[in-house]
Amino acid sequence: MKYVSTRGKADILDFEGVTLAGLARDGGLYVPQSIPVLSEQTICEMAGRSYPEVAFTVIKPFIGGVIDDHALKAMLEETYNETVFRHAAVAPLVQLGSNDWVLELFHGPTLAFKDFALQLLGRLFDHFTAKRGQKLTILGATSGDTGSAAIEACRGRDNITIYMLHPHGRVSEVQRRQMTTVLEPNVVNVAIDGTFDDCQALVKACFNDLSFRDDVSLTAVNSINWARVMAQIVYYFTSATALGAPARKVSYSVPTGNFGDIYAGFIAREMGLPIDKLVVATNSNDILARTLQTGRYARGDVHATISPSMDIQVSSNFERMMFDLSGRNGAAIASSMQAFADCGEIRLAEAELNVARGIFLAEQVTDEVTKKVMAAKFRGSGYVSDPHTAVGLKAAGLLPESGPARVTLSTAHPVKFGAAVVEATRHQPQLPKHMSDLYEREERFVSLPNSVDALQGLVLEGRVQ
């Protein structure tokens, strides 16, 4: 398996290369040269198998032989087990109605879906750096959940130093403390005076500074790293086959801001999983919903909401989708992304938009509606959802009640957004036992202005020490 950049000019790499590179050197995102297709029989045989077994079948084609089968199986067993994810099913389905399910993706160590990819990515980094005798600098941006999951996956690893940027005052207290109370010397938390989009722009600027990138051996843990998307494909297969696929179609409602989680669903569909529709569920930061409704991908102002992990107005992974919609035309994507950088908007061609609308639906959900959904689900079934999941539950209503199974991805434990849950339901979610002392732990982070020079100076200073 080889990987190409969405902008067409970077070197073609293998899986090891793209995992360590993160962002392509031409500014694009790496995608597989071709998408492997699994036979109906192979998908049938996933039913009843363990999560690591399904993960091996789904992931192996993307690895392309750079990790031998024995080592890959061991890595997956170490990642997806009850000790790490604290649930026998790893990603359990909970039925809320006759044809409605929630896929709970929050049983990992940091209580968010990002653990599925980042627990594996930390082990991949260990494998490749040990093989190469190399040390890495990881630079990432978070709107909440990516940061804590990445830090948890990388803390204490000898060959990695991780710098994680978050927008100061724009993540929940639980999300912040999960990051800032990790005190291992290889972890540096950075509070940026700005929004998540500002944090993400700083990370991209550092990656596009090729001299700096090479000097500090920079790599990424954000979903710009293909390995992140790859790992998230697995739970679409485990959930769909549990509900009767391939004989039965399934549709998914996905709370998303950066388009990574739902893009993983698109890849699962391309691999042969019978996904009928994918619903883009957004809060008032609705660039994705507006794009699918109007064809105009335009940057807007970021609004603070009760679902802050989706407070994003530049969705990095949408570039991968545009690449597919364009017939994998790297030159066209490079031109479009330059236009977006220059003027803040681009338009999809009518043919591209029609293809996208055949796969995706989209809905924007306000904070007030989100609270009403949380309250109604709690009253009706006793189910407690975090605000991101509630956005997904509301958007799932775009799908017909009968027909393909309706699955909403539950991306975070309600305790991570306890204030919003209490306001909506009058129910106080509790921290799990392994995090019960979170509010008593020492915090440590660095505050920086929204400045590339300040950030690069911090990283270079750390390399000298």
Image: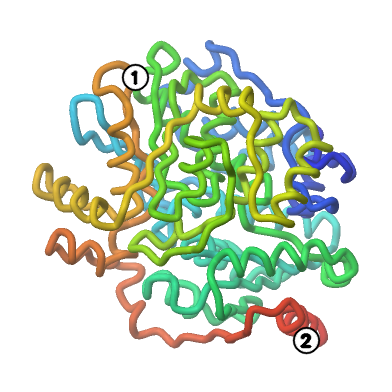
Find residue 415 and report its horizontal and vertical position in percent: 29, 64
Residue at horizontal 32 percent and vertical 31 percent from the top = 398
Q: Is residue 142 left or right of residue 139?
A: left
Q: Amino acid at mark 1?
A: Pro
Which is in the foreground here, disc 2 or disc 1?
Answer: 1
Q: Which residue position holds label 2?
A: 461
Question: Quick check: can you spot residue 75?
Answer: no
Q: Is residue 6 left or right of residue 265?
A: right
Find residue 379 and report its horizontal and vertical position in percent: 9, 48
Q: Which quadrant, please, contains the C terminus?
A: bottom right
Find residue 312 and report its horizontal and vertical position in percent: 51, 58
User: Which of the marked residues, 2 or 1, is nearer the chain's N terminus?
Assistant: 1
Q: Amino acid at mark 2?
A: Glu
Q: In this rendering, is residue 162 above or below 421?
A: below
Q: Which residue position holds label 1?
A: 404
Question: Quick check: can you spot residue 39?
Answer: yes
Which one is nearer the viewer's eye here, 172 or 366? 366
Per the image, label 1 sits on a secondary structure element best described as loop
Q: Badge 1, how many Cα within 10 Å: few under 14, some, many 20+?
A: many
Residue at horizontal 60 percent and vertical 71 percent from the top = 164
Q: Which quadrant, please, contains the N terminus?
A: top right
Q: In this rendering, is residue 362 above or below 415?
A: above
Q: Find residue 168 and name its label.
A: none
Residue at horizontal 21 percent and vertical 48 percent from the top = 373
Q: Quadrant of residue 250?
A: top left
CA separation in Å, label 2 and label 1: 54 Å
Find residue 62 and report its horizontal and vertical position in percent: 70, 33
